[in-house]
Amino acid sequence: MKLDEIVISKAIIESYKEKLINALDVDVAIVGGGPAGLVCAYYLAKEKFKVALFERKLSIGGGMWGGGIMFNEIVVQEGAKRILDEFGIRTRKYQDNYFLADSIEAASTLCSKAVKAGAKIFNLLSAEDVLVREKRICGLVLNWTAVETAHLHVDPISMRAKFVVDATGHAAEVTRIVERKSGIRLKTKTGKIIGEGSMDADLAEKLTIQNSKEACPGLYICGMCANAVFGGPRMGPIFGGMLLSGKKIAKEIIKKI
């Protein structure tokens, strides 16, 4: 049978349209497709919650692909190794409490498992604003990353969510929008973003998990975003805290819903 280019195009457009329309009203919207966001999406979708994840870049997986200085190996500690085990990601012991994994296997498996659990992932879409009702974050304003990059004047679309998760890493993009535009006070010491400090892997790993929590009504944060918002050092090329952080936020949102 001959292939018809128009049928191929219609198949893509019709399928994507249906997927996007279905994602405009969800239980949880996650911004950022790094390890914390993917783990969070997986555990929420596994419990049958409706989850949409939006990643501004073409690739999903955040900084995990590059390991440390583009050496595609990652390190996790004992507690986080159990998450990799659950995902079926192979690890190798380096010494006590230090385990290695191939960053390509890890990133691709996290993405695959999240999708197969039921999370809908949209790449090349950026959150340019949030929806606010009665001082609570209740959705996102979305536009194509290409529109943002080209500085085109193209109006966005909106989507609704019971909870929004900022998993945008060091930039804390969603939380910065909330701070700048919403008039909502964050649950930090100052009511504003504290900022990220210089590297201290041991303290940063602990604080990444501790600081992963509700930043304001309707908005949760996880991964490196947590230390950027509540204050804490960066951790460098160790990924355990981000995995544990994503799981923690998923559990907290499950309880709330």
Image: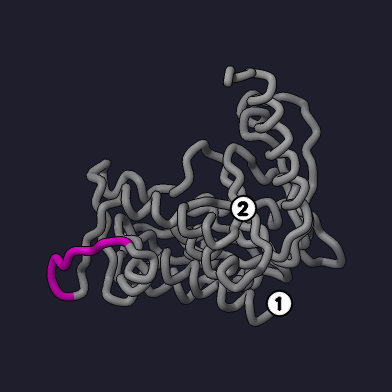
Disc 1 marks a residue whose amino acid type is: Ile
Secondary element under disc 1, as helix, strand or loop, is loop
Secondary element under disc 2, as helix, strand or loop, is strand
Residue at the left extreme, as displayed: 95
Would residue 146 appear left or right of 95 to someone viewing this image?
A: right
Residue at the right extreme, as displayed: 134
| Comes first in the chain, label 1 or label 2 | 2
Question: Could you say where residue 113 lies in the image, as x and y percent from the top left?
Answer: 46, 59
Quarter location, residue 178: bottom right
Which residue, given by chain and number where applicable, does mark 2 sit on? 120
Q: Does the magenta stretch include residue 92?
A: yes
Estimate how packed mark 1 is, as few (under 14), some (14 to 19) or many (20 or more) residues with alpha carbons within 10 Å: few
Q: Nearer the viewer, residue 114 or 39?
A: 114
Estimate how packed mark 2 is, as few (under 14), some (14 to 19) or many (20 or more) residues with alpha carbons within 10 Å: many
Q: Is residue 181 magenta?
A: no
Question: Could you say where residue 151 lies in the image, as x and y percent from the top left?
Answer: 67, 26
User: Residue at (72%, 43%) from the top-left corner?
Assistant: 142
- Quadrant into which the C terminus falls: bottom right
Quarter location, residue 162: bottom right
Say above or below: 183 vs 3.
Answer: below
Question: Could you say where residue 65 lies in the image, as x and y percent from the top left?
Answer: 35, 46
* Residue 189 appears anywhere in the view: no
Q: Which mark is residue 257?
A: 1
- Quadrant into which the N terminus falls: top right
Q: Which mark is residue 205?
A: none
> What residue range appears in magenta?
89-96
Q: Nearer the viewer, residue 65 or 109?
A: 109
* Residue 55 appears anywhere in the view: yes
Disc 2 marks a residue whose amino acid type is: Lys
